[in-house]
Image (spheres, rainbow, N blue to C red):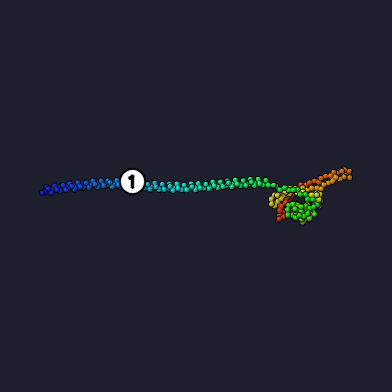
Amino acid sequence: MKTLIFSSLAIVGLLLVGLQHQHLRELRTENAALQQSSAEANQLRADLAKSSFDQSQDDDEIARLQEENHELLKLRNEVNQLRETRAQFEKLNAENKRLVAQTKVSANNQPRPSVQPVSIRINNMVNRGWGSPEDTLQTFFWAQRERNNDAFQHSVTPKSWKNFRDYLDDDSWQNFRNYVSIDIVARRDMNTASVQLGIQMQEAFSPQSYDSFRHVVIPARQGATRKLIVTLVLQDGEWRVDAWN
């Protein structure tokens, strides 16, 4: 009976040891699987972290490329605007040159006003006022002939009065009486307020005469011609003699 009990206990012990060994093997197998899973999990974590870092780099690169593309589009737009502006400028410049050339041609083709010589006898001169350069010139010489100081002074500019006032003295007045006519032969408009008149002052014709003292005949002589350019300016609505040479 005791032998049977001991045998049963031995068998039970062996079964327990077998079960323990089998359980231990299962635990070792499970532990190895868990270790492998843990390694795989760590690798996945590393890969994920690396992937996240690469994604951050990719995002930065994409943002940089987008910024460069934006700047490139902006520069391209500015270049296009500059090209359009240049084309418009060249077009306007060409049109301006065309209009200038057309104006020059038109001006050259237009008849230029010619001044018909106007001859005024000294004895026929009158006070014509100061409404035009020609009227002022005649009034100027009329005042000199009449020795009219007020009209003569009014016919010249204030700054030139000191240069002309001696024309009314005796010597200048006598010399002036040697002229018989004044011819206006040219006119040049400097601007809207300045005109130049070209005049010729004709001395009296000297007929043939006899010098009884020397007993010689003095032939007839054409009077000398004095040519002058008279500058007149517009002041306070009236034309005044400013200078001559």
- For label 1, the crowd category at 10 Å Cα-Cα, with few meaning under 14, some 14 to 19 and many 20 or more, is few
Residue 194 in the image: x percent, y percent?
70, 51
Q: Amino acid at mark 1?
A: Gln
Residue drawn at x 22%, y 47% as measured from the top left? 23
Residue 80 in the image: x percent, y percent?
52, 47
Q: In the drawing, does residue 97 fall left or right of residue 116?
A: left
Residue 40, compared with residue 237, is above or below; it is above
Residue drawn at x 36%, y 47% as measured from the top left? 48
Q: In the drawing, does residue 174 fall left or right of residue 22?
A: right
Q: How many marks?
A: 1
Residue drawn at x 87%, y 43% as measured from the top left? 217
Residue 82 in the image: x percent, y percent?
54, 47
Residue drawn at x 81%, y 46% as measured from the top left? 223
Is residue 125 in view? Answer: yes
Q: Nearer the viewer, residue 16 or 199?
A: 199
Q: In the drawing, does residue 118 fall left or right of residue 74?
A: right
Q: Nearer the viewer, residue 211 or 101?
A: 101
Residue 127, quarter of picture = bottom right
Q: In the drawing, does residue 34 fall left or right of residue 98?
A: left
Residue 100 in the image: x percent, y percent?
63, 46
Say what secondary structure mark 1 lies in: helix
Is residue 169 in view? Answer: no
Q: Which residue is the extreme one toward the top?
A: 216
Residue annotated with mark 1: 43
Residue 235, quarter of picture = bottom right
